Image (cartoon, grey):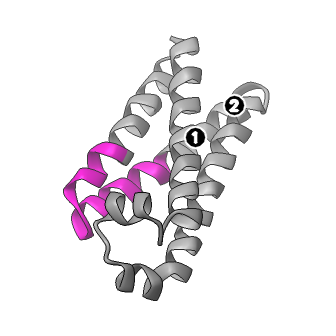
Amino acid sequence: MKILGIVLVLLVALEHLYFLYLEMFLWTRPKGLKTFGNTVERAEASKVLAANQGLYNGFLAAGLVWGLVYPGAAGVHIQVFFLACVIVAGVYGGITVKKAILYVQGGPALLALLAVLAA
C-alpha cells in the first residue's frame, strides 16, 4: 500500500505541474483556450489571474514532492496536508466553476490520501 500511496501522490503532483503549465504558459494559446473553454478576449483579460492560479498549483506540487522526500512520519503528515489542500481546492472548484474539477482534481487526491493513510 505504501508504494501505491507514493505513486498516487506523485501522480497528483505531476497533475498539478501540468495545471501550472496550462495556466501559466498555455492560457491564451489554442490548447489553453480549448481546455478552459475561453475566448481569446477572456483569456487575455484574465491571463495574470490564471498565471497566479498556476503558480499556486505549482506550490501544491512542490509540497507533495516535499512530503515524498521528507523522511518518516513528518513526510506523511506533509503529504496529508497538501493532499487535503488539493481536495478542498477540488471541492471548491467543483462547486463554483465546473463540476468536472471535483473529479479531475479532487478524485485523484482523495485516492492518494486514502492510500497514504492506509499505508
Q: 26 left or right of 77? A: left
Predominant secondary structure, magenta span: helix
Q: 42 left or right of 10? A: left
Could you tell me which residue is drawn at 38 percent across and 79 percent down?
40
Q: SS class of the residue under badge 2?
A: helix
Name the kind of residue labelled 1 in the image.
Answer: Ala
**48 above or below 83?**
below
**59 above or below 97?**
above
The quadrant holding residue 69 is top right
Q: Which residue is mark 2?
A: 68
Give, as a single range, the part of the protein colored magenta: 84-104
Q: Position of residue 99 (x, y in %)?
A: 20, 56
Could you tell me which residue is drawn at 51 percent across and 58 percent down?
22
Q: Residues within 10 Å of mark 1 (few under 14, many from 20)?
A: many
Q: Is residue 85 magenta?
A: yes
Q: SS class of the residue under badge 1?
A: helix
Q: Which residue is mark 1?
A: 13
The quadrant holding residue 14 is top right
Of 24 and 5, which appears nearest the observer?
24
**106 above or below 53?**
above
Count the marks: 2
Dots 1, 2 in contact, CB < 8 A:
yes
Q: 112 left or right of 38? A: right
Q: Position of residue 27 (x, y in %)?
A: 48, 68
Name the kind of residue labelled 2 in the image.
Answer: Leu
